[in-house]
Image (spheres, helix red, strand yellow):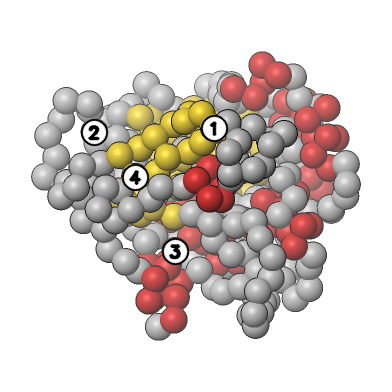
């Protein structure tokens, strides 16, 4: 995969106080749980593209995958609003090779109303269409003669399979305003487990080292739920890393309920998320454990990559 040229010309978020409410007002509640419907087609024109085309102009947040199962993953992308055309189908291809000579899945998405209602984002659920414990699958989207960056993903082993090893990267709470994501780059090749919070919430502390894409921005604006996350994945390095780091496995993040109640230890590799009574933020507030992950000591080896931020 080629590295990004930079953020110029890509769709940036237009932040405003009502962005989140405006987006949700366009969504039907039942739509939130389902991916787009993909139709088979004999029209090869939908898959044709210019190899010299600019993927960032059409797919400003690149592509991603997540939620792997033994027989599938969920693919994701977002179209730039200014290139969206109700008469143009969005094509998707999945293959076992980077050249896409051995395609195992393809189709088109033509539901323009649904794409527009979801802020021009698309999810394609491939569960039941791929093979378990794959080496890698490669995928891309094609729209209006432009191909997205190529993403890479793989499926999970079957529940009763015996594995010699399993390598995952646990990533959470990255500080968008500072740094260049070197630890993400180091973990681009194993699978990724997301701790649920891609962007850490907090104040600016100490000396700031701003990335080229972020010369000046208000923290609250950068962390805005809908538009801020869109800008995060437009960051040049992340737009290259996210397709390579796939697939993502996301779970609850207790930061949204209280910073003082996380239990995560090297010995027990535990993450417990609490639901906090938001009407009472005192230490005695009622809390209910909503999800917990625990791996017995000795079963996993954790590698501290913190020093890679500074080398």
Q: Say whether residue 166 is visible.
A: yes
Q: Is there a contact, CB below 8 Å, between mark 3 and mark 1?
A: no
The residue labelled by disc 1 is 287
Q: Is there a contact, CB below 8 Å, between mark 3 and mark 4?
A: no
The residue labelled by disc 2 is 157
Q: Give the farthest residue toward the front.
A: 284
**Where does residue 239 sit, x and y in percent of width and height?**
57, 59
Secondary element at image label 4: strand
Q: Nearer the viewer, mark 1 or mark 4?
A: 1
The residue labelled by disc 3 is 184
As measured in the structure, the alpha-carbon distance from the residue carrying label 3 to the one carrying label 1 is 33 Å
Q: Say whether disc 3 or disc 4 marks the residue closer to the N-terminus.
A: 3
Q: Nearer the viewer, mark 3 or mark 2?
A: 3
Q: Is there a contact, CB below 8 Å, between mark 1 and mark 4?
A: no
As measured in the structure, the alpha-carbon distance from the residue carrying label 1 to the one carrying label 4 is 18 Å
In the image, is 171 to the left or to the right of 21?
left
Q: Nearer the viewer, mark 3 or mark 4?
A: 4
Q: Say whether disc 1 or disc 2 marks the residue closer to the N-terminus.
A: 2
As measured in the structure, the alpha-carbon distance from the residue carrying label 3 to the one carrying label 2 is 24 Å
Q: Nearer the viewer, mark 2 or mark 4?
A: 4
Q: Is residue 125 above or below residue 12?
A: above
Callout 3: 10 Å neighbours few (<14), some, many (20+)? many
Secondary element at image label 2: loop
Q: Is residue 275 above or below residue 139?
A: above
The residue labelled by disc 4 is 270
**Where does residue 37 sit, x and y in percent of width and height?**
59, 21
Q: Could you tell me which residue is drawn at 30 percent across and 29 percent down?
A: 70
In the image, is 311 to the left or to the right of 114?
left
Secondary element at image label 1: strand
Task: Answer with the quarter of the image where residue 132 lies.
Answer: top left
Q: Say whether disc 3 or disc 2 marks the residue closer to the N-terminus.
A: 2
Secondary element at image label 3: helix
């Amino acid at each position: 995969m080629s590295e990004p040229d930079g953020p110029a010309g890509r769709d940036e978020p237009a932040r405003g106080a009502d962005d989140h409410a405006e987006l949700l007002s366009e969504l039907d509640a039942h739509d939130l749980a389902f991916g787009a419907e993909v139709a088979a087609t004999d029209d090869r024109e939908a898959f044709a593209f210019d190899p010299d085309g600019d993927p960032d102009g059409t797919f400003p947040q690149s592509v991603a995958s997540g939620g792997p199962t033994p027989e599938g993953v969920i693919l994701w992308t977002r179209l730039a609003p200014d290139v969206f055309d109700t008469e143009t189908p969005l094509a998707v291809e999945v293959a076992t090779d980077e050249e896409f000579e051995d395609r195992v899945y393809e189709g088109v998405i033509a539901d323009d109303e649904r794409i527009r209602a979801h802020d021009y984002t698309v999810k394609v659920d491939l569960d039941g269409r791929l093979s378990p414990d794959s080496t890698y699958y490669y995928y891309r989207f094609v729209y209006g003669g432009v191909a997205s960056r190529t993403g890479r993903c793989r499926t999970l082993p079957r529940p009763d399979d015996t594995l010699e090893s399993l390598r995952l990267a646990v990533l959470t709470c990255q500080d968008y305003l500072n740094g260049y994501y070197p630890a993400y780059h180091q973990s681009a090749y194993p699978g990724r487990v997301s701790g649920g919070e891609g962007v850490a919430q907090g104040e600016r502390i100490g000396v700031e080292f701003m990335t080229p894409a972020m010369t000046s921005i208000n923290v609250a604006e950068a962390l805005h739920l809908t538009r801020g996350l869109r800008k995060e994945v437009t960051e040049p390095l992340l737009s290259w890393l996210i397709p390579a780091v796939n697939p993502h496995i996301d779970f609850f993040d207790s930061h949204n309920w209280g910073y003082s109640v996380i239990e995560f230890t090297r010995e027990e590799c535990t993450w417990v998320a609490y639901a906090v009574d938001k009407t009472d933020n005192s230490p005695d507030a009622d809390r209910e454990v909503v999800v917990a992950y625990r791996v017995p000591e000795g079963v996993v080896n954790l590698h501290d990559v913190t020093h890679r931020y500074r080398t």
